[in-house]
Amino acid sequence: MSEEVRVRQGGRRTAPALAGLGVAALLMGAATFDAGSAPLGPVPEPPAVPGPQAPAMERARPVSLGIPALELHTRRLTDLGLTGGGRLEAPGPWQAVGWYTAGPAPGEEGAAVLAGHVDSRSGPAVFFGLELLEPGHRIRIGRADGTTARFAVERVEQYAKDDFPARRVYGPTGGSAELRLITCGGAFDSRTGHYRANTVVYARLIG
C-alpha cells in the first residue's frame, strides 16, 4: 500500500508558513496547534445512527488512518512525545499524523490523541477540512496487530487557544475507548504567525 496521503483538495490559504504545532502538557495546559482550516467541497452525509459503543481493545500501535468523508487515507503516522517544555512534539512532515505514544493507543481504553497540520505554504495538509466532520462520520485506524479500530464522530468543537479545556479533551473517559483528532482552526493571527483556535474531533469506538 502506498505511503502517500490521499486527501481531497480544496482552497489554499495564503497565510505564511505555519511555525509548527505544539500542545501544552496533557491535562495541564492549553493546546496550541499552528495549522489552520479552510472550506472543502461538500462532505458526504454521515450515517443516521453512529452505532453502539464497543468494548476497548488491547494496546497496539496505529499504522494507518482513514476518514472516508474527507477522502483521506494515510500510512504516514509518526510517534509524538513531549518536548522539554512540556509541549507535544510536532509531526515533522505536513502530511504526517502524529500519535501521542504516552497516552492510549487508538482502540484502547481512554482518549487516544492524533495530531496533524491542516495547511502549509504549499497547500492543504493532512487534516485539511477536519472541522467539516459531523456526528456519525466514520474514522478507521489500522493497527499493528492486524486489527482495525472503527470510530464514529460524536462532535466537533473549536476552542480558543487561551481557553483550551485540557481535562475535557485529554482526561478520563469513564472506561470507554475514545479518539481525539486535533489541529488548528479559527482566524490566522499575522502578528504571531499562529492560528487562534484549535479544532478537536471527539469520536468513540464502535467496532
Image (tube, grey):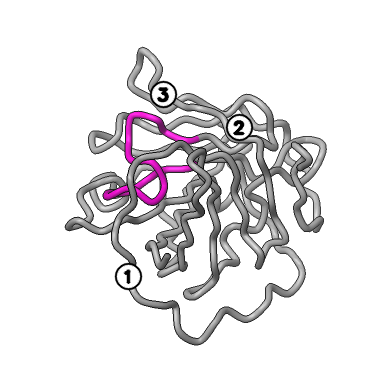
Residue 61 belongs to magenta span: no
Left or right: where 60 falls relative to 186: left
Which mark's residue is nearer the viewer, 3 or 1? 1
Type of the residue with mark 2? Gly
Type of the residue with mark 1? Gln
Furthest toward the front, the residue is: 146
- Of residues 49 and 186, the one drawn nearer to the viewer in this rendering: 49
Q: Which residue is mark 2?
A: 193
Left or right: where 111 falls relative to 191: left
Pinpoint residue 101: horizontal percent, then vertical percent: 40, 30
Tell me what residue is drawn at x 45 percent, y 84 percent: 49
Report the span colored magenta.
Answer: 99-114
Q: Quadrant of residue 130?
A: bottom right
Above/below status of 95 relative to 137: above
Are the residues at dot 3 and dot 1 in contact (C-beta closer than 8 Å)? no
Q: Which residue is mark 1?
A: 53
Pinpoint residue 8: horizontal percent, then vertical percent: 78, 58
Label 1: few (<14), some (14–19) or many (≥20) C-alpha neighbours in 10 Å: some
Mark 2 or mark 3: name the one nearer the start of the chain. Answer: 3
Tell me what residue is drawn at x 60 percent, y 32 percent: 193
- Mark drawn on residue 92: none
- Mark drawn on residue 81: 3
Label 2: few (<14), some (14–19) or many (≥20) C-alpha neighbours in 10 Å: some
